[in-house]
Amino acid sequence: MNRNYYILTAIMLILAIGTVFIHERKYTSELPASELLWDILQPSRFVTTDQVAKRIIEKDPSLLLIDVRPASEYNKFSLPNAVNVPFDSIETATGQQYFGNPGTKVVLFGDDGILANRVWILLRRLDLKNNYVMRGGLNEWIETIIQPKRPKQTDPEISFEQYNFRRAARLYFTGAKVVTGNMKKEKVVFKKRKRAAVAAGGC
Amino acid sequence: MNVHELNPKKTLGVLIVLVIVVIIGFLTMKPSRYDYKLNVNQSIQLLKDTSEINFYPYELVDVLNHKNKNVVLIDLRNKYAFGRGHIPGALSIPSFDLTHKKNLRLLKDYKKNGLTVVLYSNNQLSADGPWFFFRQIGFNNVRVLLGGYNYFLKHKNNLAATRSDNSYIKGIERFNYAKVSKSSDKSFELNQNNKPKPVIFKRRKREAVAAGGC
């Protein structure tokens, strides 16, 4: 009867020794390399400048803009309410607090979208989701939102609608200059009409 | 009395089969074909030195003249786009097939032989992701063609002259953002030349009331 238990013990020992020879595999929170390339090839992370502008104007509370350029350039100009996380500090504690929070959509932007795209890849590797890249970066932002070009007469109606939106967005982001001129109070003169004699004629 | 002890031979048989299955599972478990060789911090450091990662369009001149034989061009666009036109001598590997066993082995051979692999696609952005991926899994001979195929097609005949052109270089400011974003453009002013005018009421003259009669 005890023989079974000896055999069982022997099997367990063999299995335990066997685990020594298993390939070492790292178990980290990182995304497996085989999945990363697949995610890189999906274009769903790119958002247009129009979409970003619309979200800013609507004051979307879930939107978090992140400027990946160095701090010196961020201090000169950035998008409204954007936070500066230079690309070399995304792994530090100050950088990490902005990413992967549930309920926020992080939009990364730089000068051209190349650097922001690389930062996105690193964040995806760290298995952080809900990150987006503004296509074209700030150069495209200036070209489309701040200096929109009037579409040609032959363009479809949708590009005119887009143009109108961009013009309105431009006023929102640059502040419209309103010319008021010399406003003086003018007296409003009422002239009393002379009344004709009552019932001059009549039956 | 335990259930096992009723039929010890049967229990033993089942146990042995189970153990064999587990052992076979462990033995056939292969390590994945590629894994990260650079950690995240090393990858960030890599981005700071751009001289190692960029392949400029004017460097193509030597490649096309067969002067520089250490470069392999790889076209990441789909087969259809490749068939319509590509950089002479380029190899077509659509980006979704990059990690196939065959292609990975090819890239490993290139690395072993000290060849530089230049990835290109329609623009820099679509080749940039695969480039960064390959750097992270340890292919340090991979570079990306600036400007991509679209730029090459435009400047096919004067590639050497693109040395002085910077329109394909990314990551630089094309505008003075702060200056451009100020409101100084008069074309968008509201209320142009509208001087307020005094309000004048004009009453039309009435004819004398009941001047005539019935």
Image: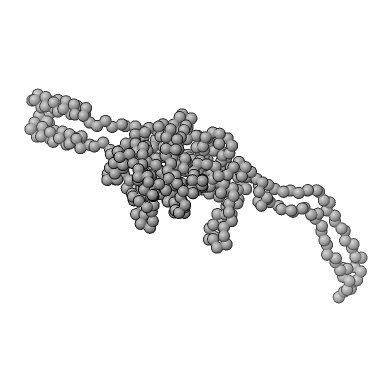
A145 vs A64: above or below: below
Q: In which quarter of the image is residue B7?
A: top left
Give the color scheme: rainbow, by chain, secondary structure or one colour: one colour
Compare residues B38 and A104 and report the one nearer the observer: B38
Indicate the position of residue B119 as horizontal and vertical percent values: 38, 45
Residue A88 located left or right of residue A162: left
Compare residues A182 and A4 and report the one nearer the observer: A182
Going 83% across and 62% down the picture, which residue do you hit?
B203
Indicate the position of residue B72 as horizontal and vertical percent values: 35, 45
Indicate the position of residue A116 as horizontal and vertical percent values: 47, 40
Q: Can residue A157 be seen in this view?
A: yes
Going 36% across and 33% down the picture, which residue do you hit?
B38
Going 28% across and 42% down the picture, which residue do you hit?
B105
Q: How many labels does the image show?
A: 0
Compare residues B140 and A86 and report the one nearer the observer: B140
Q: Quadrant of residue A194?
A: bottom right
Residue A136 located left or right of residue B109: right
Indicate the position of residue A72 as horizontal and vertical percent values: 56, 34
Q: Quadrant of residue A11?
A: top left
Residue A87 located left or right of residue A10: right
